[in-house]
Image (cartoon, rainbow, N blue to C red):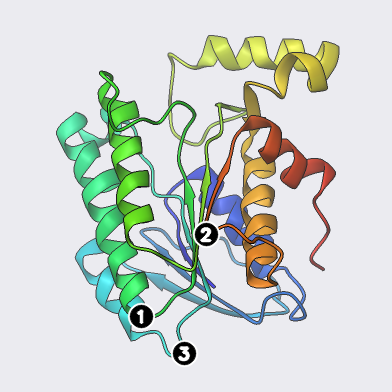
Amino acid sequence: MDSADTSQKGSYITNLVRSASPAHISSVDILSRRAPPEEASSPVTFNSFVEKDTAKWPAHIQSLAPPPSIYFSALATTRGNAGGFENQYKLEHDFNLELAKAAKANGIKTYVLISTANANAKSSMGYMRMKGEIEDAVKAMDFDHTIILRPGLIAGHRQESRPMEAPIRWIAAGLGAISTHYLKDPWAQEAEVIAKAAVSAALKAQNGELKDKVVYMHGSEIIQYGRTGWKDLK
């Protein structure tokens, strides 16, 4: 299992798989610009490739032997942190696809992409268009299984500063206090729930329980897989 991790959702995925039982996951390889938090012990073999020079990441993916069966991509940043949309596009689109090509070349079977709601390659909005272009390009690579999660607003605390989202997250928290199921879940999901949905769907694909080559997961499916359908991997 391989994970490209630069986001809060990626951190949750890492924590879930590194603490899983070997009956579900035998080993984990993570690529990150920052060292993951230390854990006292992990029941699975855990390999961390920490490299700020991301140009070295594709070669590392292709060097993994035997190749992982699942690849998770949670690469994400903000326009502000990237220094403009052009730089954001280079990371989230160009680099994401470079890593996906390396994963495909090494024989990885299942690709899991954390995208966003309303992603559309024909959108007039740059961010939504970029996300849609990533989805289309990954699908064209023809993995055995491609799982694309399209969460809405990421509720709860964010690691990266996103002041424009803060009032909306506050509204989501307030509505969730009244009724999580009816007022928040359809349009806002926590990062941990999204991560659980990603891992759960990937393991179902690995076990032959997902028949479709391409699976989209929107708000309701993310809630189903990440909360009501989630089974502890320990």
Residue 73 in the image, given as x and y percentages of width and height: 44, 55
- The alpha-carbon separation of the residues under discs 3 and 2 comes to 23 Å
Q: Is residue 75 above or below residue 190?
A: below
Judging from the image, what secondary structure is the residue with disc 2 in?
Answer: loop
Identity of the residue drawn at 44% across and 75% down:
108
Give the farthest residue toward the bottom: 65
Give the residue pinned by disc 1: 106
- The alpha-carbon separation of the residues under discs 1 and 3 comes to 9 Å
Identity of the residue drawn at 62% across and 21% down:
187
How many numbered circles does the render carry?
Answer: 3
Give the farthest residue toward the left: 86
Judging from the image, what secondary structure is the residue with disc 1 in?
Answer: loop
Mark 1 / mark 2, whichever is N-terminal: 1
Disc 1 residue type?
Answer: Asn
Identity of the residue drawn at 71% across and 64% down:
209
Report the side of 204 relative to 130 (left or right).
right
